[in-house]
Amino acid sequence: MVDRHQGLLVTLAATGSVLALSLTGVVGPTTAGDPGAEPEVRGVTDTSIKLVLYQPPEDDSVSRIVARFVAPEDDNAEAAATVRGFINVLAAGNPALQGRRIDLEVFTGSANLLDSVAARADAVKIAEDIRPYAVLNGPLLGTAFADELASRGVMCLLCVNGGTNRFYADHAPYVWSVQTTPEQVGTHVAEYVSKRLAGQPAEFAGDEALQRTVRRFGLISVSGPFGGEGLGPSIADQLADAGVVLADDVAYGDANGVGQVQATMIGRLKSRGVTTVLYAADPIAMGSLMAEASRQQWYPEWVMTGGFSSERSSWGRRSDPAQMAHAFGITPLAPPATSPQDDIIFTLYRTANGGDEPPARQSAQMLWAPVFLFFSGLGTGDDLSAAGFRDSLFGAEPLGGDPGTPYIPLMSYGDSSLWPYQDFAGIDDFAEIWWDTTVTGPDEFGERGQGMWRYADGAARYVPGSWPSEPPHAFVREDAVTEVAN
């Protein structure tokens, strides 16, 4: 696995010691023979490749709520500067660019992240007025932005949260992500629940009566403008296929409105005798729903599913500790590094940018992802069409998956033995986690506090079909880690 990782991700260039990607591309011209002719690939000339970085408006209330949870200290200007710095990391000496520079244009959204009409209008403006090769990021709380860009032949990278397999297939080869699809989450949840939880008492609940009760599962998901409509149904369907019956299945529209329905949702789950909540919704609503459960004096097990990547210590600390004490489950996320300052991403950034640190330090890992995905899809640089981008990713060897480096999840695209469909979404493996209310340490942003996710069995990761058929290792302290050496 280590050799595969190195073959995909890095070879240190002799000049500047920066990343050069060794991905396989396909041969094909990128410009017409006449130097003055319109490029065959939008946003590409003989000397440059134009990218757009989408940023949400900072004065929008929804964006402020999201920013408070994701990166409270980073502003748009710092994020843009960090993306430019990451481009420096991957562009210098990179043969795939064939001498071209990267021109990055920043675009600020015209309305809040829940406004699908504005998202479409922004996509049209980007596609028709700016005419980039690709767009990095987008209003993640919906699919309208990506849908409009794809219809106009513009790729967007990490601009969708919760896109289904059908969505990616219908918009291929223009929409790409590193996040798991709802169907992939459902596959892992169904296997984990059916093999490790079903048919056993809810031993991790906070109420003695619940602890003596054979688990009755209730699903909480989001059905609104997040683009996550497929997550709840995918989990429910695959649980049913695995022989797991849900006692109840509830959903809300969006995090802003969950306060209007949370009392009804929690009361209904409690009245149906649910012992174990399968949480497949966003991290903002999680705090509200857990607080409501405490108000109703209901302390079930909370099983994280990996939906919306809600399993971050920084988010868990914002939820009721009386409920978090009974939280465990699975996640596609990897544990943080023991020495964040020595993380390969930060080290490479400093090397390529005169020793400077990323200005947007809290969100640097997230800002790295679309830049890395862009360079990964360039292949040799001989075919920069969207089809060539697809072929480069589909033809690449998987990245990560080495037990010796559990901070690098297994990532692959295209056809593989792991999924019965083409994969446009990257991460394939999950880890088992549980919330430790007693531990003190830094979260993903380096902020010290009490309460952290522990990764069971030294942060061991599992691909579909490999989950053990034995009781969960939740709340087993032996070999459970909050961070791993990098």
Image (cartoon, rainbow, N blue to C red):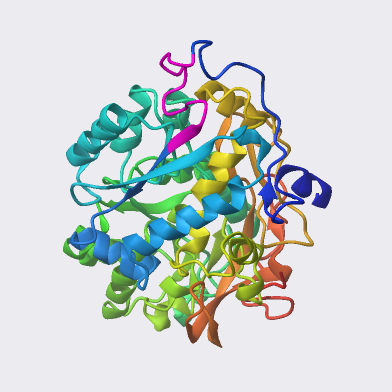
Tell whether 348 sits left or right of 128.
Answer: right
**Residue drawn at x 73%, y 70% as measured from the top left:** 458
**On screen, residue 306 above or below 214:** above
Tell whether 382 sits left or right of 251.
Answer: right
In this view of the protein, which residue sits in the foreground, 441 or 80?
80
Tell whether 413 sits left or right of 233.
Answer: right
Whether residue 453 is in magenta: the answer is no
**Residue drawn at x 53%, y 65% as measured from the top left:** 214
Would residue 284 be visible to someone looking at this image?
yes
Q: Position of residue 160 (x, y in %)?
A: 39, 42
Q: Position of residue 357 (x, y in %)?
A: 53, 70
Q: Which residues are magenta?
A: 35-50
Whether residue 44 is in magenta: the answer is yes
**On screen, residue 127 above or below 458:** above
**On screen, residue 303 above or below 116:** below
In this view of the protein, which residue sits in the foreground, 132 or 452?
132
Q: Position of residue 275 (x, y in %)?
A: 44, 67
Question: What secondary structure is the stretch in magenta mostly built from?
Answer: loop
Number of marks in picture? 0
Q: Position of residue 354 (x, y in %)?
A: 58, 66
If the image is split into quadrants, where does the C terminus sit? bottom right
Quarter of the image where one finds residue 43: top left
Instruction: Report the residue that reaches farthest toward the top.
Output: 33
Would residue 367 be visible to someone looking at this image?
no
